[in-house]
Amino acid sequence: MAALQAKAGNRAVTTAIQRATVTSPGPETTDEVRASSSRTPEAAASSASGQAQGEQQQDDAARRKQVAEDEAKDLKKQAGTAALTRADAEAQMWRKTGVAAAARKEATAAEGEAARSRDKTDAAERQRAEAEGRERDWAEQVEEAEKARSAAATAVSDRTGDETAAGTREAEAREGLADAEAEVQRCTEEADTAAKELAAVEAEVERRRKKAEAAAKELADAEAEVERCTKESDDAVEAHRQAEASLEALASAEDEAQQQAKQAAEAAHAAVETWATAVTTAKEQVVALQRKAEKRQGKVEAEEERQREAQAAVEERDDAVRSAVTGVEEAQSVLQDREREFAAATRAREDAEATLTTREGTKAAAEQQVSRAAADRERQENAKAAAQQEVARFEATASAHRRVEKDAREAAGAAARVRQQAGQDEAAAREGATEATKRAGEAAGQTEQTAEPEKPGRLKRFSKAFGFTNLKKMGDPGDTVILRGTAPSGAAARAAASDAHRAPAFGTPSQQVFESSHNFGITALGLGNDSRGLVSALKTPKDTQGSAAHQADKDKKGKSAGVLTNATMLAGDGMKVGGGAATKSGIVEGVTAAGEGVGVTTGLFSVGIGAREGRAIHLTSQKRDALKKHALKDVEAVRTRTLQVVLDRLGAVNAELVDKAAAESGSEAGPTAEQIESLDRSRAEVASLRTELREHLASAQQYAIHKQDNKIIKRAVSLGGNVVRTAGGILVVITLAGTLATPAAPAVGATGAAVLGSLAAYKGGKGGYKRAESVRHPDKWRRTTMAQGDTEFTEAGEEQKGSGWRAALEAVKVTKSIEQGERQLRAQEIYALAAGPAVPVGRNVPEDIRAEARGLLLDLKCDPARRNENAKEWSDSLNDPEQQEDWEKYIAKQLAS
């Protein structure tokens, strides 16, 4: 059951065991003692003399070795100091060349601006002269316009007088016209009155004439009636005569006929009398009508006389009207003439005024042009003054930038010379240190020649191969299979059975005892490893520094928690063994007690592990957040080329830049255009290489964030599994107490086992895959930087793939760790960027990028406080070439997920 809990501390324990094995002195062999006791006195005396001589030689060799080592140490320290000086000088040179380049650029820009300002000055002077000429020209035009305006004003005055006179004459003509029109009006009114009177007379004449005509008509009608009556009377007389003749003719006729004829004659006589009366009446009427007609004719004639008089009056009035109209026409003609004269005078006055307005406008426009030209002249004078000030300012700025450039070039040259000297001092110190180390090695070789070399015995090799740590690793797969496969809930179910001999179908008491015994042994190994790790951590001196101090501090916390957890698990495993034995023996009470104890211990150590996982998630989240906060966002997180190739090229270009800066600063005449262009090309390439380094660093930051995300996920899954397992333990206790009679406990236990088993299988499979890949593709994660002790770097050639069966064999070697994987590669690259200039791999890293990389170390919790160091000691450790391997392993541990 301790497969997951003890893994975190196994590596530290293994390292401690290996270090103890390597550094512990071997005991004196019994053969040497036996040989020394069997020597003769002569041989002993000779041996004593030779031994004294050998001891003297050993002492001399030891002294020479110590002197050489001290010298090598001092020279290495000097080399480190020279390297720091070189790095500082190189950084100073880079900054100063940058300052010089920027100052040169600013000076060139200022000189260009000064030239443009001088051009502006010349242009402003030309425009000022032009404006002044325009001002004189327009002033002359103003004088001419004033003369024209005065003449126009005089003309306006004359034309105004003419217009006034014409207006007076027009008024007089208008008055005459008004009088004539009044006369016409009067005459017209009188003519109208006469016409009205004539019309009235004519109407009366007409009326009278009509009456006369009516009377004449009546007279005619009466005369016609007289004539008709006369004719009728004549006819009646004739009829009467004929009747009398007829009467006379019928005198002899019958009485009746005579009577008829008599009656006819009487009738005719009566008719004659009647018609005679009618004629008389008609004639009287005619006479009356004649008198009436004559009377009316007289009135008509009288009225016609009045009409003639009225007609004469009308004609007289018409003549007066015509005369008045003629006077009006003459007055109108005069008025029109006067109006034309007035209009002409007005037009002349308006033309004069328009001319005056034009002249005034011309004058005003000319005055405006004068003002504008004066303003333009003044503006150009101001522009000229401003341009002259700009020229002075830009020339001063250019001069200041040139001084800055010169000072920066001199400072860069000085820094370059310091860098060259520091490089030479560093090289000399390293060469001297190498020679001293070589002498120390020679002295050590002489010392070793006088003493037999120590050889590790078989017991040491066996204990190294089959120590507690490796045994634990070997037993972990079987322990995981048992815990997560064959017995996830069988123990609890068997313990909960009322009949001890009624075992589940998938297991037997013997199997339970075997499985629990295996778990007990592995847990005991884990407890032993954690205990030894805790003891080792507690024994670590307080003044210990570096990764050992950090690891000891972590072990004090982690191993103590591991001891408590493993002790609880060990008690649970022991109860499982006891429960299996009780089941085999048929002791039901023992089964129940063991089951309750297993449930309690399962809940306890699951709670402990869950608390550890929760704390780990919290700390990892803080670590991830810090990494994200300080992640580089201005470059891409890519690795385009091998890091060491980029560093070596950067070193070469920096050396070229140093030589160029030194040569440039040594010239009194200043750098030539070719030198400046060459220096700029070198700086541009350095800038590109610096960007590439920052891209490597950004890629490492993203990898670290990815590892922390994975760690949070795995810890969260483990936390969830342990929460479920805690619930399973509680349910086991409840079930055995008789409170719950359902298969909930086995189901929950199986769920927790499935979750934790899946996580264990994922970890085991991933580890096996990585081991197989390290054999199948050995160059996949090959170092991209120089290792400790290397002075040159060779890029990998064509990859040589390992065989499939060797890869499969390597995958099952659970005790073997991967020496070079992606995590180790990333740790090496991070160290390469963070290492000090005294370390060969960090020799060419710029200071600002080194500071960013060291910021990543702080985010990875590789800070001085955790290493029990102050800031200077921490920086010195990063600048120590002999601590490169320790730092790389330390960073790799901090990157682990």
Image: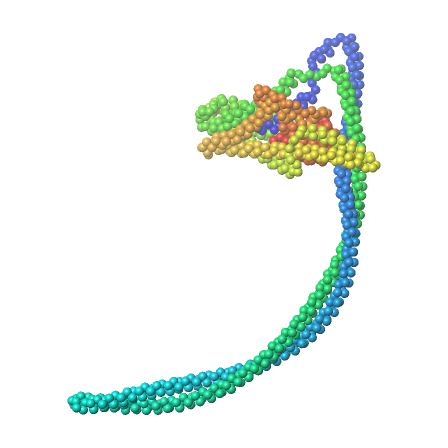
Residue 499 in percent (x, y) is at 44, 26
Residue drawn at (49%, 22%) of the image = 511
Decide: is 256 above or below 70. Answer: below
In the rendered view, does 774 fall on the left or right side of 206?
Answer: right
Decide: is 540 above or below 279. Answer: above
In the rendered view, does 752 fall on the left or right side of 858?
Answer: left
Q: Splitting the image into 4 quarters, where does residue 827 fall?
A: top right
Residue 587 in percent (x, y) is at 47, 25
Q: Is residue 391 visible?
A: yes
The residue lying toward the viewer, choosing from 592 and 162, is 162
- In the image as oriented, which residue stretches furthest toward the right? 668
> Which quadrant is home to the N terminus?
top right
Residue 738 in percent (x, y) is at 46, 32
Decide: is 33 above or below 363. Answer: above
The residue lying toward the viewer, choosing from 371 and 728, is 371
Residue 292 in percent (x, y) is at 40, 89
Residue drawn at (80%, 12%) of the image = 49
